[in-house]
Image: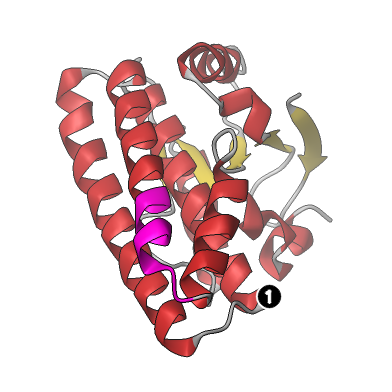
Amino acid sequence: MLAEYKAGTDMLNDLKFLTLSSDEIADEKTIQAAVERLQGTAPETPVVFVAALGQTYKTLAEAGEKSADQDLVLASALAEGLRTYHMQLAQQVTSPAVFRETRSLLSGLFEELSDLLKGLCLLEEFTEQAARILDRYGERAAAIMVSHALRSRDVQSACLSTREIFQEPDDVWKEVQELVQKGSIPVLPLSLHGSGASIRAQK
């Protein structure tokens, strides 16, 4: 379910934080329902954290394990299946005009994922850090999807997951604050919810 938190910062008072779980954004029906619920938060502007879509975490973990075991063919097939799944859903939940951008961003993201799997194959190991990075690819893809679904309904939204943003969370949080002030809904990967910047902003 949508988890809701209240927070205040030096710049903004009473921010609303919402979290979308994997089950809430698993298919066209659930994504559309989640977007409608986000629309219903108006006139407030929530900060939205999203998990990976559906069973994406599980599939990414399997792909990472197969790569480390030197089975790059199967790992690549799993990644391609995820790419197709995300592309098909994106086409269903975004308008044609927005989908062009969505497709471009997702294509770039899954190309990065392919390179990462090749690297794991060369290293022949699947560490906890590698698992976390793979999880973030799923969350970044979901953030693109949800933000663009909102934009397709003429709701101002910005996806802060088109690049690896986790090294400088304080800078990201400043961008989040600026977006909220403009009435634009920021959509972020769930992994960022536990960052120091996020925790400090919620105190």
Q: Quick check: 191 left or right of 175?
A: right
- The residue positioned 58% from the left and 19% from the top of the image is 34
User: In the picture shown, does residue 70 fall above or below 1?
Assistant: below
Does residue 6 appear in this view?
yes
Mark 1 falls on what kind of element? helix
| Image-quadrant location for residue 48 | top right
Q: Is residue 72 magenta?
A: yes
Q: Quick check: 114 left or right of 14?
A: left
User: In the picture shown, does residue 8 fall above or below 99?
Assistant: below
Farthest residue to the bottom: give it.
123
Write down the residue under mark 1: 128
Q: Quick check: 151 left or right of 139?
A: left
Which is more toward the observer, 95 or 203?
Answer: 95
Q: Which residues are magenta?
A: 70-79
- The residue positioned 59% from the left and 38% from the top of the image is 55
Which is more toward the observer, 76 or 24?
Answer: 76
User: In the picture shown, does residue 134 fall above or below 29?
Assistant: below
Does residue 170 appear in this view?
no
